[in-house]
Image: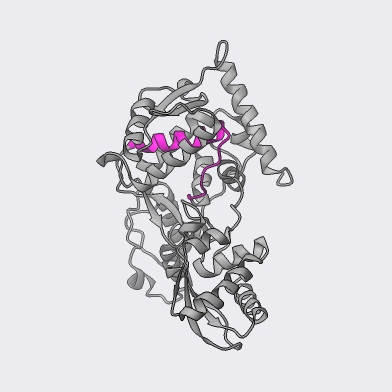
Amino acid sequence: SNLVPVSFRRVCLLCDVWEQIQALQVGRIQALQLEVPREPGPLLDVLLQRFQGLGDGDLRRPLRVTFSGEEAVGPGVTKEFFQVALRSFLDGSGDEQSARLFKCNGQQRTYWFDEQADNRDSFRACGILLGQAVLNNVLVPNIFPRVLYERLLHDLESPCARHLGLEDLATVSEDLAHGLRRVLDYECEDISTVFGDLGWARTGRLAADNQLTQDNKWQFVQAYVDWFFHERIQSQFAPLSAGFRAILGDSSLLRSMVDAVQLEKIVCGGNIPVDVAAIHRGATHEGWTQEEESDYLPIFWEVLGSFTATEKLQFVVFVTASDRVPLRGWQDLGLIVQKNGVGDERLPAAYTCFCQLLLPKYTSRERLRGGLLSAIANSEGFGLR
């Protein structure tokens, strides 16, 4: 039931996994020792060498991590290791083969598989890290779209896994989803002439000579979505999923009672509260006079800081069209506060592609607060998941 808190499900999942590990061990469970350099590239090379050749039983042990040349050990070091290692995979650090495993969607601040990437060991290691993060009770940044967790549940043959549709595709590629919606909305008989065959390898999902028509357009679009989330990324997703299953795959709780929303929260935790001070540190101001920089903009930041947690998140969605924290924290949001005229009748606007707030100059703090709240209220729901 969704009435059961995710934090409690996380504890239950950990207990379930530990019980499975203990059943396979004789005596005390030995930690998997890792000594890694801090530099992202060498760190990934060491991880790949360490994980290579280890079976599921050896991998399914808690980590004991130390950084080369440092004496510190413990939960803090382990947490730092996961942060550094995951960022290294996402940034494409390491040797040439490890580069570009994922593509970054800058607007949604998420990462998805680069279908050109060809390194099974690197994807497997990434999956191992996601599973090990749960095993070691460490939350990782929420940088993958939720559909990744749906696919992981599909591979576990979970009854909680949903069939994927256009709304899921939109979380990975809004442009592709928009194009397919145009196909569904098109009502003329020349649909096959206008849209062709949608430009994809059918791979048996549709007959090669099956042309797009008004009668089968829904079947065409769904087949495309299925291909996009399966065949198109199978070479990349399969080893990642295998690495994840090596750690958590024997959990009957995960296989039967956890849906994608819950799994995402188990791996990543809840949403990180919006840190206005951090956003301020990474922000730039454009078009303001020196006097306005010193007298007016501090009031803007004070007003924004006084918003409720929900209002702050709505503000982030308003200026970026996404509710996700950047990989390295809110200071990397890169907000641009651009002056946009003078007058209490104006409302703030935003260019979400550039994370740019178009802010009028108001005559009072109250007018400024009211203008901001009206703007974010009018955009409520856009981009929120």
Quadrant of the rendered image containing residue 368: bottom right
Residue 126 highlighted magenta (yes or no): yes
Q: How is the image coloured?
A: one colour
Camera-side residue of 86 and 75:
75
Quadrant of the rendered image containing residue 318: bottom right
Q: Residue at x 54, y 87 (%)?
A: 342
Camera-side residue of 196 and 279:
279
Magenta segment range? Answer: 120-144
Measured as percent of width and height from the top left, residue 98 is found at 31, 40
Q: Residue at x 60, y 24 (%)?
A: 18
The answer to whether residue 51 is left or right of residue 11 is left
Camera-side residue of 85 and 290:
290
Is residue 133 at least partly visible in the picture? yes
Vertical placement of residue 281 versus 111, above or below: below
Q: Residue at x 69, y 38 (%)?
A: 8
Measured as percent of width and height from the top left, residue 286 is found at 43, 76
Query: Which residue sits furthest top?
Result: 27
Measured as percent of width and height from the top left, residue 279 is found at 52, 61
Quarter of the rendering occupied by the C terminus: bottom right
Quarter of the rendering occupied by the N terminus: top right
